[in-house]
Amino acid sequence: MDLTQLGLFDQAVLLFAAFVLFTSFVMLAQARIVPLIHTFAWQGALLAVTTALVAYATRHPHLYLSAGITLILKAALIPWLLHRLTVRLGIQREVEALAYPTLVLIAGGALVIFSYYVALPIVQLSAMVTRNTIAAGIAIVLLGMLLMIVRKKAISQVIGFMSIENGLFFAAVVSTYGMPMVVELGIAFDVLVAAVLFGVFFFQMRASIDSLDVDRLNRLREVDEPAPAPEETAP
Amino acid sequence: MTAWLLGVLQTLLFVVSAPLLAGWIKRVKCHMQNRAAPALWQPYRDLAKLLRKRVVLAEHASWVFRATPFIVFGATILAAAVVPLVLAQHPAAAVADVIVLVGFLALARFFTALAGMDIGTAFGGMGSSREMMIGALAEPVMLMAVFTLSMTASTTNLSEAVGYTLNGGLVLRPSFVFALLGLMMVAVAETGRIPVDNPATHLELTMVHEAMILEYSGRHLALIEWAAQIKLMVYMVLIANIFLPWGIATELTAQAAALGVTAIGAKLALLGVLLILWETVMAKMRLFRVPQFLGFAFLLSLLGMLTHVVLETGG
């Protein structure tokens, strides 16, 4: 397929697909919490734009609804919830120490090549305009997983998880022009509930181990702390 | 023959107007920072003053130190001669493609670094080592961005690449967007602008390019400064004419040439404003964060190449 033979709106779909993929890389490189949430919100907004463009370019009006839900949930509501959480936890100025930042980005590039290789047989079978972006969808899922693997803070891992969901939604939109509305609504509310539950979980975690670093969940608490002093008996 | 004559004229225009661009950038920067701005032709006055002054040479300066300004100036002019400025069809582009252009700039950098170490002062050596570190990280990014372009246009010849983009009309290419961003970040690093280096400082902790040329004076300094201005213009013209070539003259008429001059002038003025906006919002980076900056630039150009393969040609 040659890009020059496509219409301008089909080209715009590809362009915005590339931008969504790019935000995944920005998230991998971003060490500060609040900009990370903002990048996640941008990914949601770009995803909504891509969905709306696919809806227009392929004349599937039900996708406008998906785009609207995405815009409200993933570009506004969930980032707002996460932002409020960081403020209430008092971690909005925190900077995560990234181990091997450049290596992680190169690994992300390798994941894009891998997903291109995996998607190649599907692409050859398909006749859709958006078929090339299937690889980008798989890559966004894998990059979300990579984000979850390399980060230690629970909140970054949650963002990685949400971005995996973004990738799945993106792949569904570009490979089959969206899931059935029941499934889509179900997933949307699942993600919203997950965001609320994660908030409860953060507070629980902080109350019990006094940190959001999930590595510390591996240790048993009793081992770290000295045995409580025996109570003094009254004379 | 006429083509070559026009090529030489174009290069002359390039070399002569480079200080004007530097003056424009300085002026915009002053306005942005609420300072009284120098005149637009102040860089010409500075160059004329330096050219009149006597050269003060260190006692132990070898021939490398004396030859470097001329080598750097010559190599930069040759680099400028390869880039299409006003006319899309440039005869020199057939002889020297974009890889040769990168080579010319690398040659200039190599000799500047040698001259920095030649005198044996601490500053020179420090500047040279920093410059080589930045250069080693920036060159792959530049080549990667250029390869993205050559893969699309299937040529490394700059004139043909410009012609390809012109003939294609408006095509939204994700790969070009990423390559453009990557090339812009490299241009910032290579021409010693904020956040990688600050051209207006002589503070020992932060200077890179200024540290290497600290011992130069008189006409040597004039040539090196002029070369730096031409280098900045080479990068900006590359960005303007490869990615947004509209307005460049494709035929040899006075009208087309006038339009070409106006178009490139407007594009450069706009890019200059963009550069200053970027410099104003960014803070100077610690030297050890520069690899991360350039790593991100590399990622952008890599993503440009990947999106070209995955999105634009796949299947």
Image (tube, coloured by chain):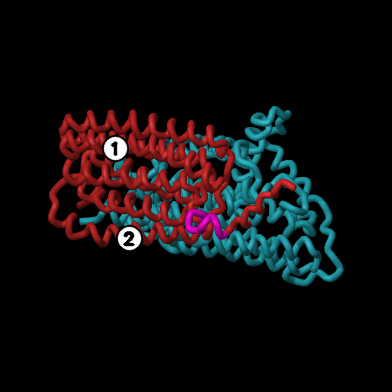
Q: Are marks 2 and 1 on the same chain?
A: yes
User: Residue at the location (48% across, 61% down)?
Assistant: A103
- Tell me which chain the residue with mark 2 is part of: A
Is A28 within the magenta? no
Q: In front: B11, or B133?
A: B133
- Tell me which chain the residue with mark 1 is part of: A
Q: Examine the image and state in which quarter residue B276 appears.
A: top right
Can you tell which chain is drawn red?
A
- The answer to which of marks 2 and 1 sits earlier in the sequence is 2
- The label on residue A113 is 2
Tell me the crowding category of disc 2: few under 14, some 14 to 19, or many 20 or more residues within 10 angstroms, Cα based: some
Q: Nearer the viewer, mark 2 or mark 1?
A: 1
Is A218 within the magenta? yes
Examine the rendering and report whether any part of residue A171 can be seen.
Answer: yes
Residue B171 spot, x, y in % from top left: 30, 42
Q: Which shade of the palette goes to chain B?
A: cyan
Mark 2: amino acid: Ile
- The label on residue A58 is none
**Element carrying mark 2:** helix
Q: Residues in magenta?
A: A216-223
**A78 over B117 or under it: above or below:** above
Q: Examine the image and state in which quarter residue B215 appears.
A: bottom right
Mark 1: amino acid: Asp
Q: Main secondary structure of the magenta part?
A: helix
**A215 over B132 or under it: above or below:** above
- The label on residue A190 is 1
